[in-house]
Amino acid sequence: MHEEARADVEAAEDLRALQEVRVKWLGKKGRITQELKGLGALPSDERREAGQRIHAVKEAIEAAIEARRATIHRAELAARLAAERVDVTLPGRSGPAGGLHLLTKVTHHLLDVFAGLGYEVVTGPELETDHYNFGALNFPPEHPARDEQDTFWTRDGRLLRTHTSPMQVRYMETHAPPFKVVVPGKVFRNEAVDATHEAQFHQLEALVVGERITMADLRGAIQEMADALFGEGTRTRLQPTFFPFVEPGAEFAIRWTHPKTGRDEWLELGGCGMVHPNVFAAAGYEGVTGFAFGFGIERLAMVPYGVPDIRWFYQSDLRVLEQFEGAL
Ligand code: PHE
């Protein structure tokens, strides 16, 4: 092969330079093309041999260019791979992970506590009938107690349940005693919204029915809950009050120590009492006794975690929600 051509090919550093070499030697006006054109001027006895020689050189140059092209291509690929090299040992960049809402965590914690005490967890409908929300719970028709729970009514005479107690009768109608259940869920009241009132909030209801269940069992259940939430030996308090569906009825509170002030205070949680005979009658039960209690979950999250405004729970503001990432 032509030594000069070989030198040109070897000197080409990239595909563009190599293309220039190809034009210089094999292009229309290239040196080899010129030589081939010059064949006609040779005497016919020399033409054949010269033709073969030039073609051989042409093929050798083509092969050299092709080989060089492959080499340049490999080198470029290697350079690109080196430039785009990924360090697989670098720690990954993870996106923001979601988390459970404080109310969800507090609810799960409560359900854990009650599951540990042998309670079954059940849920009921949020859209209720007057019968389950009031009538079967011993609210007499036209009784002012109905008005105490400001109610969202639907046009067809149903309502958004104002408490989780309707599930007491629903559960009894479909199950036989003895049993222990807890009912977590949303409840709705047509409240004037402020820092401590929302039109929608959550309650946890407990219902225990069997033979010879007494007020002492009710006290014991509330005590067990208090011990689990705030530590063994936490004080609890029952004060008489009226709910149509229990007799006797009480409100209950748990004594806890405020972590900031170090002061002991009563945390008023909710209502409780012995299931009223009229409620058992509405469910078709006879010869059993039982107790029920119910309380707002928001309050149990707000006071211990220092959330001053109930509306903050529902505003999806990460500055608020993120503060409870480590809670529970
Ligand atoms: N349902 C009552 C309320 O929402 C609480 C309660 C539950 C009281 C069970 C007694 C027994 O205020």
Image: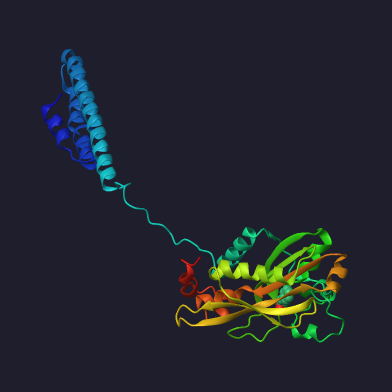
Residue situated in front as seen by the camera: 307 or 80:
307
Left or right position of 18 against 225: left
Give the percent coordinates (x, y) of residue 5.
15, 30
Q: Please state the quadrant of the image where ligand 1 appears.
A: bottom right
Tell me where residue 248 sits by quadrant.
Answer: bottom right
How many circles with numbers are drawn on the protein?
0
Residue at the image point whose x is 66% and y is 68% from the top: 220
Left or right position of 278 against 270: right
Identify the image's colour scheme: rainbow, by chain, secondary structure or one colour: rainbow
Q: Report if residue 94 is visible in the image.
A: yes
Residue at the image point whose x is 18% and y is 15% from the top: 49
Tell me where residue 232 sits by quadrant.
Answer: bottom right
Rendered-image quadrant of the N terminus: top left
Give the percent coordinates (x, y) of residue 115.
64, 59
Tell me where residue 96 sits by quadrant.
Answer: bottom left
Is residue 20 depicted above or below 134 in this figure?
above
Q: Report if residue 29 is visible in the image.
A: no
Give the percent coordinates (x, y) of residue 164.
72, 71
Give the percent coordinates (x, y) of residue 180.
72, 61
Residue at the image point whose x is 88% and y is 65% from the top: 284
Is residue 66 depicted above or below 163 in this figure?
above
Residue situated in front as seen by the camera: 98 or 80:
98
Residue situated in front as seen by the camera: 232 or 133:
232
